[in-house]
Image: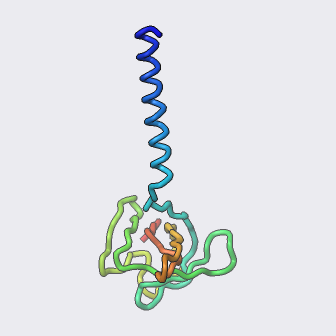
Amino acid sequence: MSRQARRTAAFSFAAATLVAVGIWSGTFLSSSAATPQVLTGTVGIVGAGGDEFAVLLSGTDQPESYGLSDSIPWRDPQGGWNFSVGAPIPCMKPLSHGQKITFGLVNANPVEDAPGGSVVVWVECPSS
């Protein structure tokens, strides 16, 4: 075997080994990222504490209800992202209703004795 053929074979073997190791290790690594489902609808009512809301999702006729954390990011009508830690999101003020919103929802699976459920991860306020 010529020197060039040996070099090509060694390079090919090394490349195949790296690809195989990458694929093998990728199957054992868990991902902690979740892609939210993007939902749009009309708010039926925001709870008195501002920590929950009912919404009629576009294309449905049954309202759904979700919780809101006090540190959820929200997008204003100009497209900027904001954090209202401890203050209500402008389009989700307590006892408000009728506003159109878009929000990101992640469904978390239960782990051991920890409960799962739907988690609102951001809210978009087309008009505030």
* Residue 110 point in image, percent of width and height: 51, 77
Nearest to the observer: residue 15 or residue 2: 2
Q: Is residue 25 above or below residue 124?
A: above
* Residue 15 point in image, percent of width and height: 44, 30
* Residue 79 point in image, percent of width and height: 40, 58
Judged from this view, the residue extending furthest toward the left is 85
Q: Is residue 61 above or below residue 15?
A: below
**Which quadrant would residue 39 be assigned to in this image?**
bottom right
Judged from this view, the residue extending furthest toward the top is 2
Residue at 45%, 42% in the rendered image: 22
**Which quadrant would residue 10 be assigned to in this image?**
top left
Judged from this view, the residue extending furthest toward the front is 1
**Which quadrant would residue 98 be assigned to in this image?**
bottom right
User: Along the horizontal axis of the image, is 99 left or right of 62?
Assistant: left
Image quadrant for the C terminus?
bottom left
Nearest to the observer: residue 78 or residue 1: 1
User: Along the horizontal axis of the image, is 80 left or right of 20?
Assistant: left
Residue at 46%, 27% in the rendered image: 13
Residue at 46%, 34% in the rendered image: 17
User: Along the horizontal axis of the image, is 19 left or right of 87?
Assistant: right
* Residue 53 point in image, percent of width and height: 50, 82
